[in-house]
Amino acid sequence: MDRVYITTPLYYVNAEPHLGSAYTMILTDTLARYCRAIGYETFYLTGTDEHGDKIAQAAASAGLEPKAFTDQISATFRAVWDECGFTYDRFIRTTDDYHVRYVQEVLGKVYESGDIYFDRYSGLYCFGCERFYTDKELVDGKCPDHLTEPKLIEEENYFFKMSKYQDQLLRHIETYPQFIRPEGYKNEVLAMLREPIEDLCISRPKSRLTWGIELPFDNRYVTYVWFDALINYVSALKRYGEGDFQKFWHEAQHFIGKDIVKPHGVFWPTMLLAAGLPLYKHLNVHGYWTVEGKKMSKSIGNTISPLEMKQTIGMDAFRYFILRESVFGQDADFRQENLIARYNADLANNLGNLVSRVLAMQQKYFGGIVQPLSADWAPEDIELRDRFVHAENELDGYLRELQFHRALEAVWSALDSANRYVVQTAPFTMIKDAETKARVGEVLHHLLEVVRTLARVLAPFMPETVLKLSELLAIGEDRLNAPWGQGLVAGHKVNPPIVLFSRIIEPGTAELKLGTTSPKVL
Ligand code: MSP
């Protein structure tokens, strides 16, 4: 049986969930749902990253001990993700006992094999990134992410012989060009590996930081947060023995944002090589979201909260917008104007109107009773079916390439055809003539097949909407996979329409003044 292991980064607990973290969750949740739907045995992991300077500082400013603080924020992450309906299989915290033990086991093993050594070091350290920077990596002397000047730190520490594995990793990436994708990020890592890389400082003296995992071979030190956190991808699978690890590790697909390519593309694989573990299968890197053209930040007050989105437009509409508006790997901009435009055009009009029109006609003309299909289908019926079969095939190909926006485009282009089919066949005119009533029954049957197909193909993207679609059709999951024309039997009764997405109208627009619909304001 095919298997897949999908992971998100472990979120730092110094900020609450926002559009950035929700983005990785939406991408991975969509993929996990799709993989399950096509029969892959799927393991989907997320969690929280809780050690290190940043967290200790955040706890101190909240007036709490680090453990009490991380318990609180980690629980918030879990509650928010649950409220959003994300279907992760395991939630790991880097403070979990089993993880701590496994990190120490890996450290002990790598130390014994001679790949960890003790040395004096002085370097420029960014507390925001929790790492040392080389002069070359700084922009105008500042950390490119935090725009702060790193501090010069000199101390004795433990180092991991990362450089020893540089060539091996370089060869691996050259042999498996899909190891890191999209390609631009692979090239970024290749460029890093073609220059000499330094060994990695993997300890912090307890005199400076106590909030971390103690080194098993020197209790004066704790582990560098990345050496701790990255190991979660393996420790999570080993929580209850070797079973999950044996089953899933070979199919590991990590999803991360572009800011953490180096730890995942260089630190992590070299750590795996040193620990004698196989490399992961793919590192999938997504871009960054800005909001109305600006970097999201608490101080500007422009952070987007997933729960607020759920309350204002609904989780499915939020998921749709995020997946449709961004191209995997590239940056995207969250604009309210675009959100409203897509919501109204794609969800309220295209999808919502089609579904309610079809069900309204079915109700009005046949009391909701599905009519029989004749053995001979008209060319336009066959064309309609073929459009959806084609869209579903395309969707599969696009999702395998992580082209989420293209997958949705394929479905919406089939939806356009369905809307054209309504205009072309004009059941609302044909019904006036008793002789063509049977044909109206057939046309509506095909349109109900459109709704049933949507309930299947949109399931990974818009899980709440597809439940509504199944309820409207009054069918269970067992009917969803039947071929076109065989999912709904004649005589079955479907339900009257409901409003799936009521139009959002911005205050002050002409439409609002005309009062065509009850306004819903963001
Ligand atoms: N704790 C580390 C990851 C350790 S994984 C072993 C970390 N955490 S984070 O909370 O800072 O970031 C988590 C993820 O959110 C990263 O993939 C990051 O790229 C993503 N995002 C944070 N802000 C973002 C945007 N504005 N847009 C898109 N993703 C962004 O890094």
Image: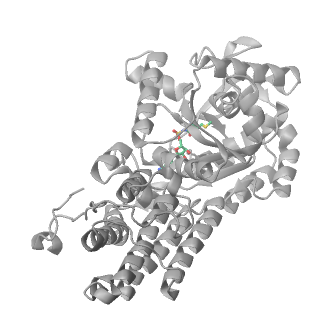
Vertical order, 122 against 252 (above or below): above
How are the colours assigned in the image? Answer: one colour
Quarter of the image for residue 89 reads top right
Vertical order, 238 against 250 (above or below): above
- How many numbered markers are drawn? 0
Quarter of the image for residue 7 reads top right
Q: Is residue 492 left or right of residue 119?
A: left
Does any portion of residue 460 appear in the rendered image? no
Q: Residue at x 49, y 49 (%)?
A: 26
Q: Is residue 450 left or right of residue 355?
A: right
x, y percent for residue 327:
54, 64
In the depicted view, which residue is nearer to us: 33 or 449?
449
Q: Residue at x 15, y 71 (%)?
A: 516
Q: Residue at x 65, y 50 (%)?
A: 39
Vertical order, 176 against 41 (above or below): below
Does any portion of residue 82 appear in the rendered image? yes
x, y percent for residue 74:
47, 28
In the depicted view, which residue is nearer to us: 196 or 278?
278
Q: Residue furthest top?
A: 219
x, y percent for residue 251:
73, 45
x, y percent for residue 522:
24, 56
